[in-house]
Amino acid sequence: MSGVFLYALLGVGLFVLGLYALIIHAHLLRKILAINVMGTGVFLVLVALAAGNPDAPPDPVPHAMVITGIVVAVSATALALILMLKVSVATGKNHLSDSTRD
Amino acid sequence: MTDNRKTGKALRLLLVSLLCAIAAWLGYAVLGLSLSHVGLGQLVGANLEASGVSHPVTAVLLNFRGYDTLLEMGVLLVALLGVWSLGGMPDYDESSPGPVLDILSRLLIPMLMLVAGYLLWVGAHAPGGAFQAGSVLGAAGVLMMLAGWRLDSRFAGLLLRVVMVSGLGVFVMVSTAMLLIGNGFLEFSPPMAGELILLIEAVATMSIGATLAALFLGSRPAVGPDK
């Protein structure tokens, strides 16, 4: 029972850690990685809470949602990476330039 | 200069405290959830007989919540279209693979194909299924591309596109056929449910594997001179 909460809180921690990295880092690759870490946190919360009831087998619906989410995250990451490469080729920088600061 | 750094530090402190507040709030929300809730597990268990498969996760994915899986295949396809329409990777130099990778990939790829087939088959009654098998196939494709293999240009045109669309296409076609014979859209019921799910999963496995490998390659494979 406490194990479930341990994993769920770990998922929350991963989510917030990813959010911090997403805000703090300007490099686009780091932002993409941060979003992936956030997504992993959400998956961990879902899978942990699916096993919440010790008397019943784990709830299959969150598991199915996590499988769907993993595939969507992979394809979104692939698209984001190619966009990042395009930005870096077009501007020579690997972060989005802030026009008010430059 | 020092002023700037000072404001940066203050902003970062503010950010950290805000995120700590968010973490505490989310943690409180998670801890407040009651674990004794029944959830949908019992409902799935009660209807498992009617789904055509005996593994609850596969039943949820392919039967009870088929829309999720259908749209997920759509997302994969749209991501691939996006990657292809962006014109692919900028030039990067391909180094020739070392002998270790070359020989290891020869050993591993038949094994990976076998594992993918096993995962696909076992998905009906144990953990496994189309997505797991498809990602193993995709990994085999990535390994082959790292070892210097490229898709033959004869197959890179129409055939590759048919394989990539087929996952979504067969799913939609089977679901529409269900609609025509009087069931609802995406409603598979016995006695054919098991076979239909296996058919959809088999085609989806090929499609997912090819799409993931193509996403890794990043650019449209070169089409032969006849195009």
Image (spheres, coloured by chain):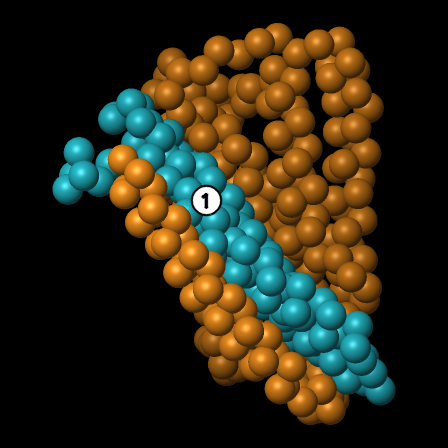
- At 25% across and 26% down in the image, what residue appears? A91
- Residue at the left extreme of this rendering: A100
* Residue B178 visible (yes or no): no
Residue B62 position (above or below residue B184): above
Q: Secondary structure at mark 1?
A: helix
Horizontal side of residue B34 vs A86, given as left or right: right
Locate residue A7: give its quadrant.
Answer: bottom right
Q: Position of residue A50 (x, y in %)?
A: 70, 76
Q: Which chain is cyan?
A: A
Q: Nearer the viewer, residue B124 or A2?
A: A2
* Residue B140 visible (yes or no): yes
- At 28% across and 42% down in the image, what residue appears? B4
**In what quadrant of the picture does the N terminus of chain A appear?**
bottom right
Q: Nearer the viewer, residue B223 or B139?
A: B139
Q: Which chain is orange?
A: B
Give me the chain letter of mark 1.
A
Q: Position of residue A3 (x, y in %)?
A: 79, 72
The crowd level at tag 1 (other Cα within 10 Å; few <14, some 14-19, many 20+) is many
Residue identified by numbered label 1? A32
**In what quadrant of the picture does the C terminus of chain A appear?**
top left
Three-letter residue code for mark 1: Ile
Q: Nearer the viewer, residue B149 or A98?
A: A98
Horizontal side of residue B174 vs B195, given as left or right: left
Q: Position of residue B33 (x, y in %)?
A: 63, 86
- At 73% across and 53% down in the image, what residue appears? B120
